Amino acid sequence: MYRKNIWEKYDNYEKIMEFNEGYKSFISVGKTERLCVNEALKLAIAKGFKPLSSYKELKAGDKVYSINRDKNICVFVIGKKPLQDGLNILGAHIDSPRLDLKQNPFYESTNFALADTHYYGGIKKYQWVTIPLAMHGVIYKKDGSMVEVHIGDDLNDPIVGISDLLIHLAGDQMQKTASKVIEGEDLDITLGSIPLKGEEKDKVKANVLKIVADKYNVSEEDFLSAEIEIVPAGPARDYGLDRSMVAGYGHDDRVCAYTSLMAVLDLEEIPNNTACAILVDKEEVGSIGNTGAQSSYFINVIAELLNLTTKYNDLLLRRTLTNSKMLSSDVSAGVDPLYLGVNENKNSAFLGQGIVLNKYTGSRGKGGCNDANPDFIAYLRNIFDNNNISFQTAELGKVDQGGGGTIAYILANLDINVIDAGIPVLNMHSPQEIVSKADVYEAYLAYKAFVEA
Ligand code: MN
Ligand code: MN
């Protein structure tokens, strides 16, 4: 059962390093699901993909994309076989834990203008204070026009942040448990401290809103119809003296999103089965809503594809799903050398050992898991071994340590064969997550081999 460290498999690391440069650019810009869709779209267009709406009919080799509400993107390369023989699907999520501005966020206190947030997804709140933060999002005005907001990732921009109590006065705070040491309602970002001249009340808040109005031509009320996400500022960086890893925000799950996307975009030959990568939103809050994996959007797009390839009817759609195979491309918990106690080593994911197959996730006796069928796992072992691709198998921590879920079960509910297959991550859900460049490249090769099979 011994498996080699990927770095030992390669004579030189050129391809690994080069691929990761592309990935670093992707996550350095793709700080929100909307920005990821935008970056994915640019990459797809550069590779000759065209919008689904531009096709009157579809034939083998056609390259298609579809976008849902600016927060999901699917790309397809139409295969040689009829669609009802099934698709090879790579599914990843492009939402990551973060802080969102509340709908009515702005207030003033003790000469500061601040904004209230509500966190999104599972975070250790204490990790988000006293670090540089950026703001990205959109504001929709009543006339239907939209303004994009991007502050903090350009080095000429200011950053924002959340304060924390000085250690000198933190005696009471330090007695609290980690889950209480920073409370959700205290994750308020500092926006400014200069009062607006001539203003009577809330002068500092007024000044900040004036700056916002001057730059974006929006009023305080327009934030009622805004989505502004507060995320760690700054680009992804090489990590480690040997530059073997990438430190960045949002590896979960943009690292699997990028590798899955590129696996389909880089297909050189027409695949047998239609190849697909779908990047979804809302995984971190339960995959609900019309941009989450539980939305009918994906099935609707498959129905459209059927309509443009052979014909659409309900039976054909059902057969298409039943015959499809999917890798739920989501990150795995990498073993952290400082916290060995939470894993059972034989069934754990190690950085540098390749893509991780999770037969099941879930918690407390596999509760809520997708349990991939063994024949499907054997099918994948065969593909990976035939293509000299490193992979490992793991569970999420030792039994009864905790757990988690992905989108795997949702697509499995459609009668698709699905397994979780992703890249191991350290510091998951923190502002600075870590992945191994070797795993990133090897996962890309694994995804490519899967859609080429
Ligand atoms: Mn994930
Ligand atoms: Mn997650």
Image (spheres, grey):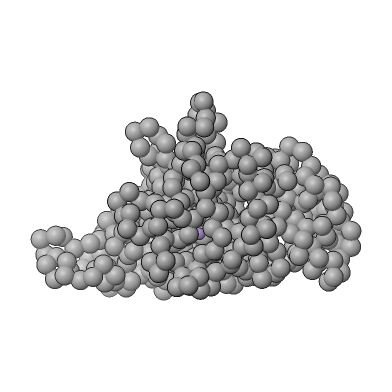
Residue 414 appears in which quarter of the rendering? bottom right
The percent coordinates of residue 96 (x first, y second) are 47, 59
The percent coordinates of residue 221 (x first, y second) are 46, 72
**Residue shown at 70% from the left, 64% from the top:** 416
**Residue shown at 61% from the left, 37% from the top:** 388
Residue 348 appears in which quarter of the rendering? bottom left
Residue 28 appears anywhere in the view: yes
Residue 200 appears anywhere in the view: no
Query: Number of callouts in the render?
Result: 0
Single out the residue that lies furthest toward the front: 1
The percent coordinates of residue 417 (x first, y second) are 68, 62
Q: Is residue 339 above or below residue 139?
A: above
**Residue shown at 14% from the left, 71% from the top:** 172
Q: Is residue 321 left or right of residue 34?
A: right
Single out the residue that lies furthest toward the top: 11
The percent coordinates of residue 187 (x first, y second) are 32, 67
Of residues 422 and 235, which is closer to you in this image? 422
Q: Is residue 407 above or below residue 23?
A: below
Residue 449 appears in which quarter of the rendering? top right
**Residue shown at 47% from the left, 66% from the top:** 404
Single out the residue that lies furthest toward the right: 310
